[in-house]
Structures are given as C-alpha cells and as structure tokens.
Image (cartoon, rainbow, N blue to C red):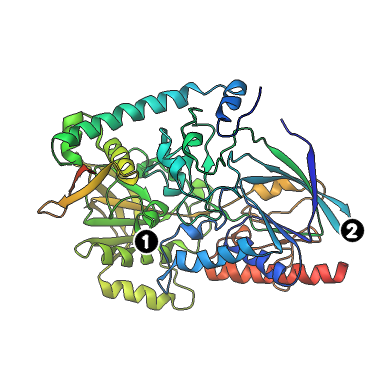
C-alpha cells in the first residue's frame, strides 16, 4: 500500500490488529471520563462525594480524576475544614 | 520481522543508561573514546532521574541528574540507543566483542519531534503511567516524563488503538507507524555492564496487604509523590484521595529476609526512608511519621547526623518487626508488630503505610554473554573478580561492571564505582590498542 506521511497509522492497521484489551480499555476510559465530567458539571465535589455519586471504588476515582487533572480537564479546588479532602471542579 | 542488519563500531559498549552507565560513558568519551549506550527504557537517567531529593544533603535529584543527562546526550563521542536491548555478546578476537542489539520502534522520528505534547493531548487512550508507578494514567502517545532524555514522544503500541489522532495533530509529521524493529551488529573493544537493580515486589509478602489495601504504597510511589513532577497536587492516599496524617514506614520489606529469597541488606532503605520522613514533615507539617525498623544502618558520611536530624524533627522510630497489616472500614491500616525493646506485641493504626522495598539484582546481564560466562555472586549480582584490587573487573577479560549491578549501593557510591569502572576500561583500551 502507498504510505502517506501523516497517515501512516493506516499502514499499521493493515498489518496489525488492535487487541480487544486495548479497545475495552479505551471504552472504559471514555465512559468513566464522561461520568466524572458530568458529575462535576453540577457542582464541585470531593473524591468521597464522587465515589458515592458514581458508585465506583474510591481508588478508581482517584486514578481517573487525577489523570483528568493531569490532562487539564479538571482542576483542584479548596481543601475542607479538616485539611483532609480537596474538592475538584471542571476546568473552565 | 527484522530488515537488514546494520553494522557499527565503537570503542566501548555501556549497557544501561542510568547514573552509573552515564557517568562511565562520559568518562570514556571525555578521554576520546567512541561510546555506545544501550538503554532499554525510553529515557536515560535510570531510577535517579525519578527521585525527589537525595540523602543526606536533600539536594534536588533532578537538578543533579538533568545537567549530567544533558551532557551525556549532547556529547559528540556518545551514541545512545533508547528502547533497545542487548541480545547477545560474543568475543570476536582477543581485543574485540560483537554485540547483537535490538532497537524496538518508537513510532516517532526522534530528530523531528519537538516535544510539543499535542499528540499526547489528542490521544484518547489512558493507561497506567509506569513512570509515576501507576498512581496516575498516561496516554498511549506520550512523553515518558517531563525531564526525560530524549524528551520526545513515543507510541505505546500495545495500548494504541491506531485511531490516527496523534498523527493528525502532529505539526512536524514525526509520527511514523511504518517503523520496524532494527537489528544492529556492534563491534566493540570493551563492555561496561551497568544494568542497575530491580526493586522488590511487595506482592511477594501477602501478609502486608500491598495490592489489596489501597493505602499501602511502595517507597518509590512515595518518592514520586514527593517529587516536583508528582502525580498529585500534594501527598494523598491513593485509596480515597485523603491527605494522610499518620504515616508508617515498614523497613526491610524484601531485604534481610531469607523467606523471600533476599537475605542481604539493601543499604539504601534506612536512609531513603529517613529522607522521605523529613520531606513529609515539610510537606505535611501536622503529620505524624513513624518508622518501624530492625536496625538503622546509617554507615555513610553524614548519615548518622541525618538520622539524628530526623529524630530532632519529630520522626518516631520504633524498633519493631511488622507481622501483619490489616485494613479498617475507613481505609486506615492496623500494623501488628513485635516491639523489640519492650518485648511485647502491639497494634497501631496509621492512615498510610509505605513499604521500604529492597534492592534486588538485575540478572539480565547473565544472558548477554554467549561464550565465557559472566559470573554472578551468591546473591546474583555481577561478581567482582578482584573486589579489593580491581573492583570493576568481572570474570571476562575486557568486561567491567559499574554501579548497583555489583550489589546494593547509594548514588555517590554508584558514581564512584562508575568512575573506577571507566578508569579500568580506559586502562584496558590503552593497553590493548
């Protein structure tokens, strides 16, 4: 096949199949990202509040939320009165 | 599938681009020798480049490593293969070796990538970031870490969905999915083994609950939390994002423990734990930090004073052997231990536990040499043929060893070892050429 610079992914697609695990992982991230961003659309939330709202394990919330902070979707808000939990909000 | 085999010649092959390998390569190159560094990771700098600060001076680790790494990268006498592995080395003559090196595709043309990270932003995939010890995610198109060298993107092909988003946004069109594995046949006159060490996997001690209880982390995960390029905005429990205020360190996790196959002391765990405790007290002034230890081994220059400084800052030292860790409903952890001074069994509650994991040998080097076995010591580190007179010599003439490939040691000792190794290699080259 002819290889066009800037579209070389098409070349590898012909030669290599994307694994089911990679596809499932992408689907899961897209789903969880939407859930977290939708929840934060309504109000700023702590990880504890997100855990209750989304009914997901808190360690998974930490992992995905911090990744969304890293990639600029979410920003860190204030810490509570006990200096224990931060709130998180959408990055405008 | 390999294309054609490429040939190249160098004076020295340095296996491993950590601080020891880099230092040895720099010394050789500064003496006019052509050096090839083969590094299996995507960046040189080894484990040191990922540390927060160093003991006992509390100097910023990145501030020491990055200028050194930059000097290595820009040196005209040094060629670096990242993402590459030595498959085999065989002796060709009395004064030369032939190494088979495999370079895995990065799917990015290194010279064309500007490190703009637009591909990273466009990539829709999120996977665990191995450079943040899985505390946070990274993309499948990614720059390994912000001070990586080379600071260019790579594609994690196992997790890539080949959607093409990265290619579409790349301003220099440097992403190239047509890249294939390359095989090199390298002729060298001498070899320096600087393959470093592995960290103990605490999953091998199920009674500590690592992996099951989410608020138990390893010392390397804490190191990342304390580093300027940390995964979180502050120190947080990965289990629920709480700022911890009662932190425990469990020393000798996987060291001095014959039951897990590592009976020797790792030499660095006491001091890096004391360092982290001091940094934690700076980051979280209200936190209580307790270090559970068997013996504090503060043997180096300034180490005892550093230990005293930690005690003076309020770090609590308990001579106790941890038997078991269990979890409460709120994610806090109960440490059941033998209080060695009082000769009683106690239980205390902490909200974050850090396992100070030990140093294990990297036995990769054993498989490199086809003829003439590279001898390992009883603990599987590279054996020093003459440890008192020529500590860098191995069982193979012309092959030298540097840094933690010989055994556990701290950063200054690794650099000293690399200096000795490069001096031996230079002397060997001058004698044989």
Position of B14 with respect to B266 (left or right) is right
B380 vs B205, left or right, is: right
Mark 2 or mark 1, which has the lower sequence index? 2
Q: Along the horizontal axis of the image, is B312 left or right of A81?
A: right
> Which residue is painted at 73% across and 47% down in the image?
B368
- Residue that badge 2 annotates: B94
Q: Can I make out residue B213 in this image? A: no
Q: CA distance from mark 2 to mark 1?
A: 50 Å
Secondary structure state at the residue bearing disc 2 = loop
Q: Nearer the viewer, residue B137 or B285?
A: B137
Residue B29 in the image, given as x and y percentages of width and height: 71, 67
Please state the horizontal and vertical placement of residue B302, each as a whole percent of the image.
Answer: 44, 78
- Looking at the image, which is closer to me, A83 or B114? B114
Q: Which residue is mark 1?
A: B293
Q: Total number of numbered labels?
A: 2
Image quarter where the C terminus of chain A lies is top left
Residue at the image position 46 percent from the left and 57 percent from the top: B50
Q: Is residue B3 left or right of residue B301?
A: right
Task: Determine crowd level at label 1: few under 14, some 14-19, many 20+ residues with C-alpha closer than 10 A.
Answer: some
Label 2 resides on the chain identified as B
Q: Is residue B250 above or below residue B77?
A: above
């Amino acid at each position: 096949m002819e290889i066009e610079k800037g579209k070389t992914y098409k070349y590898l697609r012909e030669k290599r199949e994307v694994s089911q695990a990679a596809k499932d992982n992408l689907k899961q991230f897209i789903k969880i990202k939407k859930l977290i961003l939708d929840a934060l659309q309504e109000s700023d939330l702590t990880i504890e509040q997100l855990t209750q709202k989304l009914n997901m394990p808190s360690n998974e919330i930490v992992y995905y939320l911090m990744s969304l902070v890293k990639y600029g979707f979410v920003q860190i808000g204030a810490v509570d009165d006990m200096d224990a939990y931060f709130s998180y909000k959408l990055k405008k | 599938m390999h294309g054609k085999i490429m040939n190249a010649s160098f004076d020295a092959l340095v296996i491993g681009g950590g601080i020891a390998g880099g230092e040895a390569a720099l010394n050789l190159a500064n003496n006019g020798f052509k050096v090839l560094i083969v590094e299996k990771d995507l960046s040189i700098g080894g484990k040191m480049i990922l540390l927060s600060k160093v003991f006992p001076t509390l100097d910023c680790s990145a501030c020491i490593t990055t200028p050194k790494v930059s000097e290595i990268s820009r040196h005209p006498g040094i060629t670096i293969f990242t993402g590459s592995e030595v498959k085999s080395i065989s002796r060709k003559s009395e004064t030369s070796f032939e190494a088979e090196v495999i370079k895995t595709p990065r799917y990015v043309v290194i010279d064309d990538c500007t490190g703009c990270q637009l591909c990273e932003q466009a990539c829709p995939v999120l996977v665990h970031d191995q450079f943040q010890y899985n505390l946070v995610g990274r993309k499948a198109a990614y720059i390994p870490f912000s001070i990586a060298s080379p600071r260019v993107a790579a594609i994690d092909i196992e997790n890539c969905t080949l959607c093409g988003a990265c290619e579409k946004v790349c301003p220099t069109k440097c992403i190239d999915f047509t890249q294939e594995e390359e095989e090199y046949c390298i002729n060298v006159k001498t070899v320096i083994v600087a393959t470093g060490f592995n960290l103990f996997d605490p999953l091998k001690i199920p009674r500590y609950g690592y992996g099951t209880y989410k608020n138990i982390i390893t010392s390397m995960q804490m190191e990342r939390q304390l580093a300027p390029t940390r995964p979180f905005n502050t120190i947080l429990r990965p289990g629920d994002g709480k700022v911890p205020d009662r932190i425990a360190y469990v020393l000798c996790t996987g060291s001095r423990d014959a039951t897990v196959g590592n009976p020797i002391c790792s030499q660095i765990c006491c001091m890096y734990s004391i360092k982290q405790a001091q940094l934690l007290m700076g980051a979280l002034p209200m936190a209580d930090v307790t270090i559970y230890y068997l013996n504090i081994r503060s043997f180096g220059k300034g180490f005892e004073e550093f230990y005293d400084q930690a005690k003076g800052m309020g770090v609590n030292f308990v001579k106790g052997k941890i038997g078991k860790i269990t979890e409460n409903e709120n994610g806090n952890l109960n440490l059941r231990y033998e209080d060695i001074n009082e000769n009683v069994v106690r239980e205390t509650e902490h909200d974050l536990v850090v396992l100070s994991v030990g140093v294990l040998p990297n036995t990769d080097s054993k498989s490199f040499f086809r003829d003439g076995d590279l001898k390992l010591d009883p603990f599987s580190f590279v054996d020093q043929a003459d440890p008192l007179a020529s500590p860098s010599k191995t069982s193979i003439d012309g092959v030298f060893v540097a840094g933690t490939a010989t055994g556990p040691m701290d950063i200054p000792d690794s650099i000293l070892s690399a200096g000795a190794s490069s001096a031996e290699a230079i002397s060997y080259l001058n004698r044989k050429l």
